[in-house]
Image (spheres, rainbow, N blue to C red):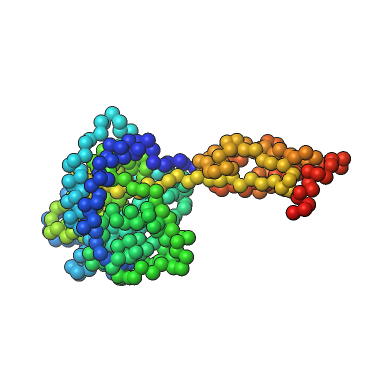
Amino acid sequence: MKTKLGVGSALCLLMLVLSSTRLELPVLASLQGEGRQGRGQDVLGVSILPAPTPLVGPEPEGWTAAQTSVSVLSQEDRSGLCGVPLAVIEWEEEQASQQPPMLSASYTYPPALDWRNYGGMNWTTPIRHQGSCASCPAFATVAAIESRLEIAEGDPGLNPNLSEAHLFYCGCGACCGSGAGPISLMEFARDTGIADEGCFPYTALNQACSPCQGWQNRVTKISDWAGVTGVENMKQTLADAGPFEASMIVYSDFYDYSGGVYRHTYGSLEGGHAVTIVGYNDYGGYWIVKNSWGTGWGENGWFRIAYGQCSIDNYAYVPLVAEPSYHVSASASPHEGGVIAAEPPDCVSDTCDPETVVELAAVPSNGYEFSGWSGDASGSENPTSIVVDTNKDVTAHFIFRCDECTPQAFLPIVIR
């Protein structure tokens, strides 16, 4: 199934309504972190208990508190899990308070959506582990972009694996201790691009910006990003465009979360955190969220959180991934044997959208006749049609049949 799920008209409307948000962005320059660090899956080396041990304390309502791979860490190691400066969350709250609400009549989102099971397919990538490095903004950004790439390509099996290390250590610096603002990392993904994981593997320690040789040819870029505020707008954006990054406040009870719909119940404020929202459920009143603390925490690394909790739905950072465009390379063999006419012509002269049906007609030169197609077209039907679902290469073959024709038309070819 080829699903075309680009940034829809509703998102365009959101961007117009919320365009004033982008005017505020320069004030965040002082809020960006100055550090770097790594990635890895379950790199903390903590044994995950097969059966979580219930904790003694206030009884949470709607969720389970238990011993997790995070709750057993030292306070120092846990503090490294929160990488969004609280000043950024305060700015997000200010933006949310200033944005005009959209009219409810313009909403078309379904009552529940989960990109882990959309159309029976999983459009997310695996849970990863940031380790005790405040690199959560890089993990949240990458997770959102990876899902958006799959959606834009209409291929849930694409499973891209981008480098959080490249984004964090090159886009922020030695920021494991300070964290980073999401805006600076979104702009790095737009302006520089993110290399693949194999080019710059993640470790949870401050690293120099040292991607592989030739990394410039291995980057993935987003076309831009958009800021969206408000619960209804965020749900519409999820339905139209896919997962996005959001910030939240972490309290110490969140380390104990092992399932259910989280609501802050007890514990002290620990810091700001970046996550990736992949769905919602209006029946239960919660967001479905991807974390970067490994699979030994939460619901195998995921969590659900009630609307309005911990500032999670104040502001969304939406990576915009351009839908792919493809090109048809058409040639004649021999070159002087004829030409190929295409309709629409843009697919040959420039690019065209995925799933475009292109009609190709082989037009022989004087003395030649068409003999057949090769490459991504076959047979001898003329004209013929192809579906442009990737870059295509087509050759029209011609045979010289005119013994009585003068050689003048071909003399320049021979001289060359």
Task: Tell me: 189 left or right of 388.
Answer: left
Q: Quadrant of residue 55?
A: bottom left
Q: Position of residue 180 (x, y in %)?
A: 26, 60
Residue 104 vs 298, above or below: the answer is: above
Q: Quadrant of residue 59?
A: bottom left
Give the total of numbered labels: 0
Seen from the viewer's position, the closer of residues 336 and 238 is: 336
Q: Position of residue 3 (x, y in %)?
A: 46, 41
Q: Residue at x 57, y 36 (%)?
A: 344
Task: Tell me: 123 left or right of 368.
Answer: left
Task: Tell me: 272 left or right of 364.
Answer: left
Task: Tell me: 144 left or right of 314.
Answer: right
Q: Quadrant of residue 258?
A: bottom left
Q: Residue at x 20, y 43 (%)?
A: 96
Does the rendering let one see residue 376?
A: no
For the C terminus, the quadrant is bottom right
Seen from the viewer's position, the closer of residues 25 and 207 is: 25
Q: Residue at x 25, y 45 (%)?
A: 23
Residue 104 vs 289, above or below: the answer is: above
Q: Position of residue 68 (x, y in %)?
A: 24, 62
